């Protein structure tokens, strides 16, 4: 059952645009939800499998967006002392790759600096880092255009064998691109979690003292997890920039990190499908509520749904449903009475 759920959900998402009739409004909602779900999956690698809460995760998302946009747009900035940095525009695919590498590199720096102390220090470092990056994007106007935003970001172009170059401009094309990247990220996380490295992560989360006693290098393991998590968030930010084709410092809003945390916690942190289920619910819920109620009422319902889910299933939707199905299966197993003749 657990193995069939991801395949069934993937098949449903592949066929979903056919049922929607390529409705541009709903496709836009699904694309943005998918991008945020990739960010939530990357956050779950830290929060769910290592127990480290990153409240500045949006920094890696924003770094990916800006690096990818600037790579594909090019820039010419004065660095001082008579030095100028000049970069000619590169293909958007190169921007996606560089965004992933740059965000992963920042994850490495943050991990090396903060995982030696961990706990609340890691939370403070991530929040501070996100604010510093936001201020850089806001004030380095020559490079980022500040509040005026980077505009005319090119769409991603893919080279397909025998078909030439394919520019992903339509919403349907971007939907399947986001779905493909999200599936790849999910498979990477699933492989990591099932490996020896994944067991080391869970060991540090459950009992760090015992994990250290059997030779697990805590700093190294957590840093690698932070690098992979940040790289995936950077890839999500790149997709966001090339889909909207405009980016400004509002991409670093703290509310986006909170949304990712809600997706992870409500869906079930530490489970592979949790961020996906939570992402779909809390990404599409505002879209469903928008036509029927005022914005203020939407946020009230949004909060009430979150409270009800966590009250009924404190571990999240996926672990809660798994436990419920497990209990039903146990109850359905017939109990065989002992045969006295056999016992003798």
Image: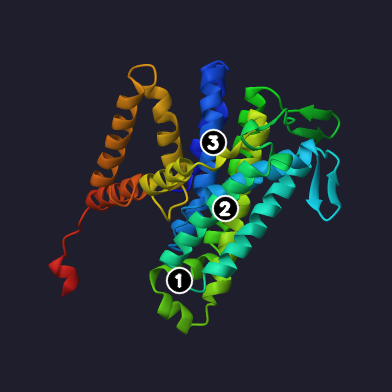
Discs 3, 1 touching: Cβ within 8 Å: no
Residue closer to the observer: 335 or 342 = 335
Residue 235 appears in the picture as rendered: no
Residue at screen point 74% across, 33% down = 156
Residue at screen point 65% across, 46% down = 64
How far across and down, in percent of the image, does residue 161 sit?
84, 35
Residue at screen point 80% across, 47% down = 78
Quadrant of the drawing holding the C terminus: bottom left
Q: Quadrant of residue 225?
A: bottom right
197 left or right of 77? left
Residue 6 appears in the picture as rendered: yes
Residue closer to the observer: 48 or 191 = 48
Q: CA distance from mark 2 to mark 3?
A: 27 Å
Between circles 2 and 3, the one closer to the viewer is 2
Callout 2 secondary element: helix
Callout 3 secondary element: helix
- Look at mark 3 in the image and give the residue it sits on: 34
**Above or below 189: residue 76:** above
213 left or right of 157? left
Q: Say which mark, if any, is on residue 297.
A: none
Q: Say which mark, if any, is on residue 204.
A: 1
Q: CA distance from mark 2 to mark 1?
A: 29 Å
- Look at mark 2 in the image and give the residue it sits on: 132
**View extreme (front): residue:** 81
How far across and down, in percent of the image, does residue 73 sit?
78, 36
Discs 2, 1 touching: Cβ within 8 Å: no
């Amino acid at each position: 059952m657990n193995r069939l759920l991801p395949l069934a959900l993937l098949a449903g998402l592949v066929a979903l645009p056919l049922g929607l009739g390529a409705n541009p409004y709903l496709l836009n909602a699904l694309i943005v939800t998918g991008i945020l779900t990739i960010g939530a999956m990357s956050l779950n690698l830290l929060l769910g499998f290592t127990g480290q809460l990153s409240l500045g995760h949006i920094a890696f998302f924003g770094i990916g967006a800006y690096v990818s946009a600037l790579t594909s747009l090019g820039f010419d900035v004065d660095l001082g002392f008579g030095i100028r940095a000049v970069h000619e525009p590169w293909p958007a695919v190169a921007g996606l790759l560089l965004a992933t590498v740059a965000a992963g590199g920042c994850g490495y720096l943050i991990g090396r600096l903060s995982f030696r102390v961990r706990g609340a220090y890691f939370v403070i470092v991530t929040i501070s880092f996100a604010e510093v990056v936001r201020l850089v994007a806001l004030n380095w106007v020559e490079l980022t255009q500040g509040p005026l935003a980077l505009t005319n970001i090119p769409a991603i172009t893919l080279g397909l064998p025998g078909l030439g170059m394919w520019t992903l401009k339509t919403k349907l094309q971007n939907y399947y691109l986001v779905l493909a990247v999200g599936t790849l990220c999910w498979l990477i996380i699933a492989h990591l979690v099932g490996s020896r490295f994944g067991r080391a992560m869970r060991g540090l989360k459950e009992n760090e003292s015992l994990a250290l006693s059997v030779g697990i290098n805590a700093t190294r393991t957590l840093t690698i997890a932070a690098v992979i998590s940040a790289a995936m968030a950077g890839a999500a930010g790149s997709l966001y920039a090339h889909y909207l084709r405009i980016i400004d410092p509002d991409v670093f809003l703290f509310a986006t990190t909170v949304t990712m945390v809600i997706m992870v916690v409500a869906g079930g942190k530490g489970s592979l499908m949790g961020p996906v289920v939570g992402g779909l619910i809390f990404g599409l819920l505002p879209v469903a509520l928008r036509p029927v109620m005022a914005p203020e009422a939407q946020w009230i319902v949004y909060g009430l749904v979150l409270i009800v889910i966590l009250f009924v299933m404190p571990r999240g939707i996926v672990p809660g449903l798994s436990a419920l199905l497990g209990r039903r299966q146990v109850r359905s197993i017939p109990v065989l009475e002992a045969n006295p003749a056999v016992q003798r």
